[in-house]
Image (cartoon, rainbow, N blue to C red):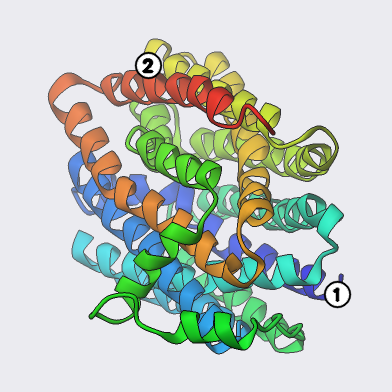
């Protein structure tokens, strides 16, 4: 339990840092650096894809060498470095580099960290463990957004000062990781270890990871494939923020809208994950993806501030119902000694879809108008909700 709390504190502080920046970054790009929606889509697509693709390799190697903690420390340190690059930025290329460094760190840390959580939790309380971690993480996000609101009004939209202040919690968060104590990963039998160490193809780690696909449960394979398809319509959250700003609402109001999202997400994630331990993961995942489709349809159809308050709140329900629950589902089905690798495979498939997803959203916005990417996202969300009902029918 101590490991889960320490990792939660680190995530809380890191999210305070990250969310001081996240809601203002699209406006900084557009209003100060002259970038358009297509550049935003390019930056977010590349950055998030890099993070997700790296998760599978960090997960694989942490399973391979049976060590998780150094990956987490290195990854969280990358977040602090990314904030400094934003502070010295003068063109959108600096922002791209900053996001790459930050997301590289996220890619390095996520799968090993989640594996530590799974290793540290009792099997029947794994959903609650992930939910607690997500709740602390999201509470940090809410604090970070609130600080962004205070600082953006206090310093009259001086973005650079906010970037500088965000370094403080990022650095402190890394320090807590040094108190984490890893639990020993169960070893395979000598025969299984030989199979694990033998190259499945002529190439190295990438081919070995691909070879592990055959060892996964059929239901898990279908879930991973379906997640990839859904991701094509799941563009960066920064498009939601840009949509609110584009509708004529002040930056301070946009930040408060994002705060509502994080508060609802934080309040829902832990009880939703605990509930999934009782009633199963399927119902919450299906409901969560349905909420996603409704939210994106709402963003396509409406511009009013009152509707945006409602939509950002419902969007928090989607994330709270799916994030921790989805990870718990994967760790339930995955082989115990391939847990981090499987988490990484899921992230990699998501990552492959994130680049075209954000590029598609940027192009749809540019050529068909601000509502177009949200119609597309709504369609994919509703499709995901229906598909998951059948894929997970036995759960």
Q: How crowded is mark 1: few (under 14 residues within 10 Å), some or many (20 or more)?
A: few
Classify 235 as above or below 248: below
The percent coordinates of residue 306 (x first, y second) are: 57, 15
Residue 300 shows which numbered tag? 2
Q: Where is residue 197 in the image (x, y as percent from the top left)?
A: 45, 86
Residue 362 visible: yes
Q: Which residue is drawn at 17% across and 33% down?
A: 363
Say which residue appears at 37% left-offset and 26% top-offset.
377
Q: Is residue 159 above or below residue 273?
A: below
Q: What element carries label 2?
A: helix
Q: Nearer the viewer, mark 2 or mark 1?
A: 1
Q: How far apart are marks 2 and 1 (CA)?
A: 44 Å
Residue depicted at 76% across the width and 83% down the height: 183
| Residue 156 visible | no
Is residue 223 toward the left or the right of residue 336 in the image?
Answer: left
Residue found at the far front of this picture:
191
Occupied quadrant, residue 374: top left
Local secondary structure at mark 1: helix
Q: How crowded is mark 2: few (under 14 residues within 10 Å), some or many (20 or more)?
A: some
Identify the residue at image location x=64%, y=52%.
Answer: 333
Q: In this view, does 32 lie to the left or right of 144?
A: left
Which residue corresponds to mark 1? Answer: 2
Position of residue 385 in the picture relative to residue 98 (left or right): right
> Which quarter of the image is occupied by the N terminus?
bottom right
- Of residue 303 and residue 11, the one placed in the foreground of this image is 11
Q: Name the residue nearer the viewer: 195 or 16.
A: 195
């Amino acid at each position: 339990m101590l490991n889960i709390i320490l990792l939660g504190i680190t995530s809380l502080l890191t999210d305070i840092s990250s969310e001081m920046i996240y809601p203002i970054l699209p406006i900084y790009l557009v209003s100060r650096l002259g970038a358009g929606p297509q550049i935003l889509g390019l930056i977010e697509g590349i950055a998030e894809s890099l993070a997700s693709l790296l998760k599978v390799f960090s997960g694989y190697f942490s399973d391979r060498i049976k060590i998780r903690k150094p990956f987490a420390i290195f990854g969280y340190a990358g977040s602090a470095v990314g904030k400094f690059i934003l502070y010295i930025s003068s063109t959108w290329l600096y922002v791209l580099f900053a996001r790459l460094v930050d997301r590289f760190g996220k890619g390095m840390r996520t799968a090993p960290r989640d594996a530590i959580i799974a290793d540290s939790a009792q099997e029947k309380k794994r959903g609650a463990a992930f939910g607690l971690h997500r709740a602390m993480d999201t509470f940090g996000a809410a604090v970070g957004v609130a600080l962004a609101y205070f600082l953006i009004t206090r310093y009259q939209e001086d973005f650079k000062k906010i970037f500088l202040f965000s370094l403080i919690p990022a650095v402190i968060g890394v320090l807590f990781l040094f108190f984490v104590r890893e639990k020993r990963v169960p070893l395979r039998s000598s025969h299984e270890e030989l199979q694990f160490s033998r190259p499945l193809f002529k190439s190295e780690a990438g081919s070995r990871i691909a070879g592990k696909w055959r060892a996964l449960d059929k239901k898990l394979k279908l879930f991973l494939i379906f997640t990839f398809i859904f991701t094509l319509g799941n563009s960066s959250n920064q498009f939601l923020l840009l949509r609110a700003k584009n509708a004529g609402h002040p930056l301070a109001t946009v930040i408060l809208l994002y705060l509502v999202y994080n508060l609802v997400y934080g309040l829902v994630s832990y009880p939703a994950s605990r509930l999934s331990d009782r009633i199963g993961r399927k119902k919450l995942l299906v409901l969560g993806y349905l909420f996603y489709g409704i939210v994106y349809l709402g963003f396509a159809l409406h511009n009013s501030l009152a509707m945006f308050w409602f939509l950002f709140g419902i969007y928090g329900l989607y994330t709270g119902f799916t994030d921790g629950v989805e990870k718990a589902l994967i760790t339930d089905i995955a082989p115990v000694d391939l847990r981090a690798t499987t988490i990484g495979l899921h992230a990699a498939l998501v990552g492959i879809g994130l680049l075209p997803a954000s590029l598609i959203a940027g192009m749809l916005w540019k050529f068909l108008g601000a509502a177009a990417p949200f119609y597309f996202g709504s369609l994919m969300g509703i499709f995901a909700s229906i598909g998951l009902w059948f894929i997970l029918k036995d759960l």
